Image (tube, rainbow, N blue to C red):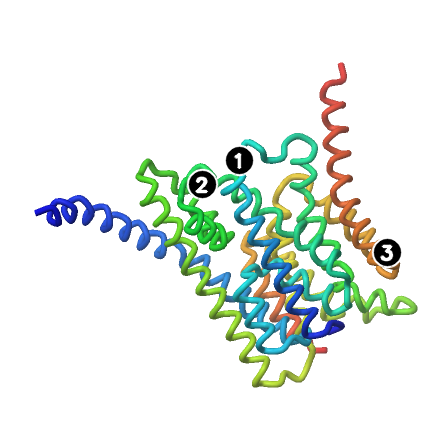
Amino acid sequence: MLRTVADAGQRPAAAARRARFATGARLSVPGMVGTFVWGIIAGVAMIQAGMSVAQSVGMTLIVFSGTAQLAALPLMASGASFALIGFTTFLTSLRFMIYSASLSRDLSRLPPALRSFAGYMTTDSGLAVYQTLSGRERRAQRTALFMGLNLPVWAAWQVGSLLGIAVMAYAEPGRDLGFLGTLAVLALIAQAMRVSLAWPVVIAATVVALIGVEWPHRAGMLLAVLAGVVTPLVLEARARSHRSAP
Amino acid sequence: MNMTALDIWIVTGMLAVIIFALRNAFLFVPASLRPRGLLERALRYAPLAALTALVAPEVFKPWLAASAFSPALLVDSRLLSAMVLLGVVRLSGNALYGLLAGSAVFLLLGR
């Protein structure tokens, strides 16, 4: 008797969750395609940089971030310090912090284990779709939708990476393919350049990075980041003072 | 690779912790504590600046290595594939198309 009452209450809820997961999974397909390609290139770039198959598989499974992995490779290849690699990773991946702020309303009441799993799963393409689907629904359905949007992208990334690693490990390419990793990062830069004041950021950072490429302790790179951040802030401040002038 | 096997695993662990912490930041810390004002704006530009600072020397590697200008530098496979990538993303608005086009140019030009 008790069981039937409980079942009657739970079955529709579970079905609704499954339906939301399925909706998310269906909508995640375009994101999966892109993530799969980025995964292949990350796999190729890791082996090309001199990492072993085990190290590459380990990094892709644990870190699960194309940008962070591709950005760290040139620094690792040149033997940069742990501090510099860590700092650069933090800077290049700040968007995840912004994502977490936008998700906090929906996810921050989940149990900690499930919440941190959802956090780990957050992908660029999954979140982009999730934010377009603001629906009034139960939190559990919302979570199911989030998982449906992100889990397939996670899988696409892992399969793509493993494919890239396998291809490089077993089919010796005749030439250095490491630059494909650079192109994968450049494509992300190009996509990010649609926001305002992106050109001053890119020009300032490029000029300083090229001038300072031989400076000790990667000072040129750090100053390039600084120039890329300060330049748009100065332009913003100037635009404001022009507007407020009589 | 200029690192020992242990170094690589340390870096992997470090990246994992940093990324995990960033992805979870405001799922555990109240979102009301997120950065605001000048810091928020600076942090908005930092990823683009950092990625550019990393990529620029790779794209212009042949230029940086050359002792004098030569026309060959203008048709270098790195620079050309980067330009094609940027142009395609600009026209199509799709990063994946840009990456595929840029990669194709790099692979076809060789070396």
Q: Residue furthest top?
A: A246
Q: Amino acid at mark 1?
A: Ala
Q: Nearer the viewer, mark 3 or mark 2?
A: 2
Say what secondary structure mark 2 lies in: loop
Q: Nearer the viewer, residue B93 or B9?
A: B9
- In the displayed structure, A225 sits above or below A43; it is above
Say what secondary structure mark 3 lies in: loop
Please state, as top left, top right, bottom left or bottom right, where the C terminus of chain A lies in the image: top right
Asked if residue A212 lies left or right of residue A133, the reply is right
Q: Amino acid at mark 2?
A: Ser
- In the displayed structure, A134 sits above or below A58; it is above
Q: Is residue B108 visible?
A: no
Q: Nearer the viewer, residue A138 or B48?
A: A138
Q: Quadrant of residue A175?
A: bottom right
Identify the residue at horizontal 63%, vertical 71% (top origin). A46
Please tell me how crowded label 2 is: few (under 14), some (14-19), or many (20+) other residues with Cα within 10 Å.
many
Between disc 3 and disc 2, whose residue precedes?
Answer: 2
Q: Quadrant of residue B76?
A: bottom right
- In the displayed structure, A36 sits above or below A100; it is below
Q: Which residue is mark 1?
A: B31
- Badge 3: chain ID: A
Give how far apart the Cα atoms at labels 3 and 2 are. Answer: 43 Å
Q: Which residue is mark 2?
A: A108
Q: Which residue is mark 3?
A: A212
Q: Residue furthest front?
A: A2
Question: Residue A90 at what x, y percent from top left?
Answer: 66, 51
Asked if residue B32 lies left or right of residue B2, the reply is left
- Badge 2: chain ID: A
Say what secondary structure mark 1 lies in: helix
Q: Is residue A245 visible?
A: yes
Question: Residue B43 at what x, y percent from top left?
Answer: 67, 41
Question: Residue A144 at what x, y percent from top left?
Answer: 34, 50
